[in-house]
Image: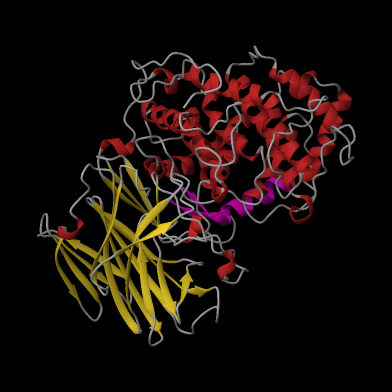
Amino acid sequence: MSIPFELPTEDRASSPYTGYTRAHWEAVADGLLWAAWRWSTPGRALLDLPGRPSRSGVRSDGLEGFARTFLAAGFRVAGADGADPHGWLDRYAEGLASGTRTPGRDDTESWPLILDHDVQGQPMVESASVALGLRLTAPWLWKNLGPGVQDRVEEWLRGALRHVPAPNNWYLFPYTVAGFLESVGRGDAETAAARVRALELLEGWYRGGGWYADGDGRAFDHYNGWALHLYPVLDARLGGDADALTRYGDRLRAHLDGFALMFGSDGAPLHFGRSLTYRFAASAAVGLGAATGHTPLTPGASRRLVSGSLRYFVDRGALTDEGLLSLGWYGPHAATLQRYSGPASPYWASKAFVSLLAPPDHPLWTAPEEPAPVEEADRVLALTAPGLLVQATRADGIVRLHNHGSDHVRPHEGESADGDDPHYGRHAYSTRTGPTAPENAADNHLSVEVNGRPSVRRRVHPLGAGDGEGWGWAASWHRPVFATGAPMVPGLRVESVTVARGPYELRVHRVVGAPAGARVALTGWATGPEEPLTSALHGLHGWEPEPETVRAPQGTAYVSWAELPRLSGPAGGTSLHVALAVLTGEPGGVREAEAVTEVVPGAEGVDVVWADDGARTRVLFDPVRVTHTAQ
C-alpha cells in the first residue's frame, strides 16, 4: 500500500530482511508527527484527531493526542542528542504552556484535570507520556520553559500522585511522573511515596521468568513489554541508577528470551490481549533491551524484530491516506478495540521509538540484520510463569500461542459470560490469525453445550507446562460459563492440555461433571478463503466422524470474512476428547489425518503414537502429567 510520506531508499546490504535503517525510523516518526500536528488547537495544547471519541470524551482524547505524540518526538530528539530539525519541541513547549494555564476549564486549550481512575482517569495515563517526554528532552525543552510554566506543569502532573490509579500497570504512571519531577529537582515525600508504592506492587506482580501479571490477577499480554518492563527500566537508565537497572534489566532480558519468539517472519506480533491498536509498540521491549544492553539477542536479531514489526504495519495500511494511525490492526477494525480507545489511542505505538535512544553508531543500527528466532528453526517453548506455550514453524514463519494461563478476570470479579473477551478466552492465538467476534462462532474454543446453550471460557487455572527437544505442553482448567439459563452447572469443569510438535497441536480435553444429554464442540483456526493458509481439525477420540466448516461473517483483524473447522460430540459425566489441529502456510498443507498412527484412551488419559518417528505422547489427568518418549 502507498505510504503518505517519503521514506529513504532501502538498504538491503545492512538490512537484508527488512531494508529498514535508522533513517527509516526517523522518517516514520517525523511522518506520524507531521500528520498528527495538522489537527492541533491554535495554542497547540490539544491534538483533536478525527474519529469517534473514546468513553473519556473529546477533551481527554485531545490531551491523548498531545501526550502520545510527545513520546515519539521525545525519543526522536533525545536519540539525536537534541537535534530537532523540524522544531517539534517548540510546538510541545507552547502546548505545555497553553494546556496548563487553566486546567479543567471548558475552553479551547485547557487540559482536563487528573482525577481517580473511576472518575476521570485517562489524563493520568497521559501524564506519564508528558512526564517521560519532558524527561527525555529536559536539556532542550524543560530548561527553556519559564518558571511559571514549569510550576504549572508540575502542579498539573501532581494530580497523578494525588489520585487513585486503576489496579494494574497504571501505578507506573504516577511512578513515571514522580521520576521526572525528582530528576529536575522537584522531588519530595509525595514523589517518593508514589515511587515506593509502584515498586512494591510491581514486586507482587512479578511471577518469574521475566513475566509480570498486569495487576493482581492473571492477565499476561503485551503490557509486559510496553508498560511493566518499559517504565522501570527506562527510569533506571535515565536516572543512572545502576542497581535498579541491573534488577529490572535482568528481568527484561529474561522476558525477551521467550518474547523474541513471538514475532512471525513477516514481522507480525501475536494477535493476543488488549490494546492491539498500539501495533508496533509490541517491539518496544526489544528496542529497549538493545538500547540498554539488557537482552539475550544479538544487535542484528534485535533490529530484525523491531524493524520487521514497524514495516509490517506501515506496509499493510495501518496509516490512513492522511498519515494518521487508524483505530484497528491493518486498517480500521472495530472488533480489535476497547471502549477506552479514541482517535489518538494508537499513538502509544510511539513507544517503539525507544529504539532511537540507541545512537547512530550503536550496534543495533550498524550490525547487519540477522534472522528472527522464528526464522532459525522450528521451536516449541513453554513459559511456565504465565502458563503459555509458544509454537513456531520456520517453513511458514507462523508463531502460535496456546493460552493456558492468561485471562482478564480480576480476583474480585465473578465469572460472567457478559465479560467474555475473545482476546483472552480462546485456547490459541497466532501471528497470522485473529480471534472471531463475540457474535460469531468462536475460534480455538472448547464449548460445552447444555440444553443447546454453549459455554464460554473466562477464568483460566493453569495446571502446568513444560517442553523438551522439539515438543512442549501446557495445561489448564476452567468452569464453563453460560450466557442464558443458569450461569454455571454445578460440578462442571473442563481440563485442557495442548501438546505442540512441529506444525501439529494435539488438543486433549477432559470434561468432568457434564449432565446427561450435554454435548461438546471444538473449533480450530479462523482463516479467510483466499488466504494461503490451511486450518484443519482432525478428531482422534470422542468426536463424531467428520468435522464441519462454520462461518464467521464478521471476519477477523486479518480478513473481512472467515471460516473455521468444528468438531462435535456427546458428553455426560466424565468424557475424553482428543483432536489434532493444524494452522500452516506450507503449500499443500500437511497430512494431519495421517500424522498419528495409534490412539489409546484409558481411565487416566490417553496415549498417542506419531507416524513420523513412532514417538509416544502420554497425557494423564489427576494430576495432569505429560510425557513424550522417542521410539
Judged left or right of residue 510, residue 59 is right
Q: Which residues are magenta?
A: 194-214
- Residue that appears at 14% across and 60% down: 615
Judged left or right of residue 510, residue 352 is right
Magenta-drawn stretch contains 206: yes
Dividing the image into 4 quarters, which one contains the C terminus? Answer: bottom left
Q: Residue furthest bottom?
A: 516
Q: Nearer the viewer, residue 568 or 446?
A: 568
- The spot of residue 70 in percent (x, y) is 68, 29
Magenta-drawn stretch contains 190: no
Judged left or right of residue 198, residue 57 is right
Colour mapping: secondary structure
Quadrant assignment, res 114 = top right
- The spot of residue 489 in percent (x, y) is 49, 82
Figure label count: 0
- The spot of residue 126 in percent (x, y) is 71, 39
- The spot of residue 625 in percent (x, y) is 29, 69
